[in-house]
Amino acid sequence: MAAQKGSDFLLKIGDGDSQAEGFTTVGGFRSNSFSINNETIDITNKDSSGVRELLSGGGIQSFSLSGSGVFMDDAAFALAEQVTRNKESRNWQVIVPGYGTYQGLYQITSLEFGGEHNGEMTYSLAMESAGIIAFVAP
């Protein structure tokens, strides 16, 4: 796979219409990261010869996203702020350029605003998966 532009790494929020859901890009990101986390289950016992053994396929898988950027007063951000206040899980898309899209329920766990007297207003957010996350290759 060829190198990809970081600006093409997008976060989109679903409009909540389960019949024909649309997605809108949350604007203003300068940096973001996405991780897939796998919890392990240790099944080491007396017969393990002193070597740790893990249960294959066991444990909980979770997906995390964090990002920060310049505050953009757009409809997508207003919706993200609303679902944060309401503690809602919402359908989101995380688009990894040249690789694919991770789509499913996520919940915003942290939303922060900031700004310096002589600078731009910024925001940062963190999200965790709240259900099954599907991967779709391009």
Image (cartoon, rainbow, N blue to C red):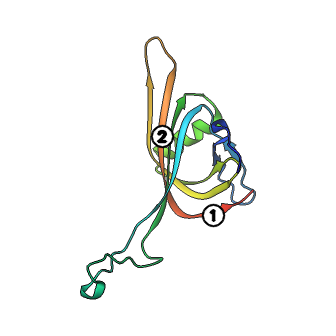
- For the C terminus, give its image quadrant: bottom right
Give the residue number, with chain letter if any, for mark 2.
125
Mark 1 crowdedness (10 Å alpha carbons): few <14, some 14-19, many ≥20: few
**58 sits left or right of 8 in the view:** left
The residue sitting at 68% across, 42% down in the picture is: 4
Q: Is residue 52 above or below residue 109?
A: below
Residue furthest to the front: 49
Residue furthest to the top: 118
Q: Is residue 111 above or below residue 73?
A: below
Q: Position of residue 59 (x, y in %)?
A: 42, 72
Q: Position of residue 19 (x, y in %)?
A: 73, 60
Q: Position of residue 126 (x, y in %)?
A: 46, 45
Q: Nearer the viewer, residue 52 or 136?
A: 52
Q: Nearer the viewer, residue 70 or 138?
A: 138
Q: Amino acid at mark 2?
A: Leu
Q: Circle 1 — which element?
A: strand
Q: Circle 2 — which element?
A: strand
Q: Nearer the viewer, residue 136 or 47?
A: 47
Give the residue number, with chain letter if any, for mark 1.
134
Q: Is residue 47 above or below residue 127?
A: below
